[in-house]
């Protein structure tokens, strides 16, 4: 450790697999805007749990958003880590239960790119509604006059029903965008009060009712044991055969093989997907070759603002904990009363676990 870093905390980050040969201060300039005076950033080898631990064992904090999963093996080997800062909304790259058991705070960035993901969700919905992939293909194939007869068989968007599974920040923003298009919006979320939904003009329903009534279903929960593959054969069978499925959340919340079967059989009419079970998909994945499926490469959050602001926000969360304060966004808030951190601000219940 250099003299200028004496007394600073150690924050471990995973060495990128492919990285430009630039000074560390340049590579992490955005993170260092918040951390430079309190912490030293150290790159560690993430090719295996053992190599990661060799460099991160004595770290006061970790910063992560990709690469090796911070699992129970790694967490149990951390000697003094106080916080794991995740530079994304989803935190499935961290074993949150193991972190909680070890008394380690896990933070995320749940409100940096809400508007972008909501925009993208509505874009995919509209692309499904107006069969944009098929229309584009027809024009390019010289079938100019075949498009109108197809769309004349499709109901107009106004007056149809959008069902939202989970009603967090992104789903709320989607609902606000959907209303001006004349969509009736319903939602299922057992962890959100009915008052929050009705305040947005959204009707609370149970899950079977959402399946039965929805013309479009947009799925938004974080990935956990309950949400994994929740849209499966049984779920698709309970839906209208005119339904379109939209996913800008986590790919594994949909049983992809079941979705393919439903699309091929006509049980599901269309799908707009920004995320898949396996990314990137194999070249022979049937979803790549369906005219009624619109795909994007896990890019719903992408704008010129997203990556820089995400990095800054993740670092700010880590700094708060290193300074002995509660973070702004804690994934495992039950840990906070049991650690030596100052509750310096009101902690709204609406933040929740973001899982």
Image (tube, rainbow, N blue to C red):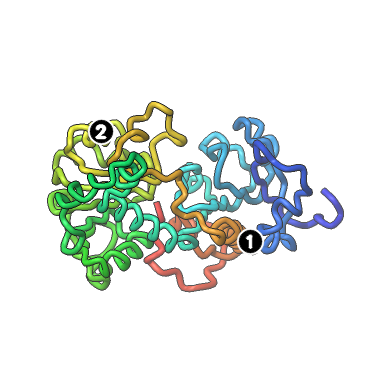
Quarter of the image where one finds residue 193? bottom left
- Residue 225 visible in the shown view: no
Q: Residues within 10 Å of mark 1 (few under 14, many from 20)?
A: many
Residue at figure coordinates x 22%, y 57% from the top left? 162
Considering every residue shown, the one lying at the far right of the view is 3
Instruction: Report the residue marked by disc 1.
Output: 319
Residue at figure coordinates x 54%, y 64% from the top left? 326
Q: How many marks?
A: 2
Q: Secondary structure at mark 2?
A: helix
Residue at figure coordinates x 30%, y 59% from the top left? 167
Residue 140 as seen in the image, left or right of residue 339:
left
Viewer-proximal residue among 301 and 272:
272
Quarter of the image where one finds residue 277? top left
Residue 286 vertical position relative to residue 134 in the rendered view, above or below: above
- Residue 55 visible in the shown view: yes
Residue at figure coordinates x 26%, y 73% from the top left? 199
Instruction: Report the residue marked by disc 2.
Output: 258
Residue 173 as seen in the image, left or right of residue 38:
left
Q: Secondary structure at mark 1?
A: helix
Q: Which is more N-terminal, label 1 or label 2?
A: 2
Eye-nearest disc, 2 or 1: 2
User: Residue 318: x and y, percent?
Assistant: 60, 58
User: Residue 70: x and y, percent?
Assistant: 54, 40
Q: Residues within 10 Å of mark 2 (few under 14, many from 20)?
A: some
Viewer-proximal residue among 317 and 126:
126
Considering every residue shown, the one lying at the far top of the view is 284
Residue 285 disc label = none
User: Residue 307: x and y, percent?
Assistant: 57, 56
Cα separation between marks 2 and 1: 44 Å
User: Residue 351: x and y, percent?
Assistant: 41, 63
Q: Are marks 2 and 1 in contact (CB under 8 Å)?
A: no
């Amino acid at each position: 450790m250099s003299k200028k870093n004496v007394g600073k905390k150690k924050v471990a980050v995973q060495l990128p697999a492919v990285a430009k040969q630039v000074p560390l201060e340049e590579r992490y300039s955005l993170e260092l805007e918040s951390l430079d005076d309190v912490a030293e950033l150290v790159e560690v080898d993430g090719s295996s749990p053992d190599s990661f631990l060799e460099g991160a064992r004595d770290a006061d904090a970790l910063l992560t958003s990709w690469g090796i999963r911070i699992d129970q093996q790694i967490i149990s080997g951390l000697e003094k880590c106080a916080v794991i800062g995740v530079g994304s909304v989803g935190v499935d790259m961290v074993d949150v239960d193991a972190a909680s058991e070890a008394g380690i705070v896990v933070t995320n960035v749940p409100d940096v790119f809400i508007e972008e993901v909501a925009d993208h969700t509505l874009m995919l919905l509209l692309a499904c509604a107006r069969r944009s992939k098929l229309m584009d293909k027809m024009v390019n194939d010289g079938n100019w006059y075949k498009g109108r007869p197809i769309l004349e068989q499709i109901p107009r968007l106004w007056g149809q029903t959008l069902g939202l599974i989970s009603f967090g920040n992104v789903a709320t923003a989607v609902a606000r965008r959907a209303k001006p298009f004349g969509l009736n919006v319903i939602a299922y979320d057992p962890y959100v009060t009915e008052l929050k939904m009705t305040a947005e003009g959204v009707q609370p329903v149970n899950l079977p009712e959402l399946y039965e009534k929805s013309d479009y279903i947009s799925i938004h929960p974080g990935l956990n044991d309950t949400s994994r593959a929740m849209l499966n054969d049984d779920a698709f069978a309970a839906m209208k055969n005119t339904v379109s499925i939209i996913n800008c959340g986590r790919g594994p919340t949909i049983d992809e093989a079941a979705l393919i079967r439903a699309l091929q059989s006509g049980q599901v009419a269309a799908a707009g997907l920004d995320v898949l079970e396996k990314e990137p998909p194999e070249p022979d994945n049937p979803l790549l070759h369906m005219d009624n499926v619109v795909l994007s490469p896990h890019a719903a959050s992408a704008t010129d603002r997203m990556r820089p602001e995400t990095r800054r926000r993740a670092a700010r969360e880590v700094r708060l904990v290193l300074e002995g304060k509660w973070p702004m966004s804690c994934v495992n808030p039950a840990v906070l009363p049991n650690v030596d951190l100052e509750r310096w601000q009101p902690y709204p219940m609406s933040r929740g676990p973001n899982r």
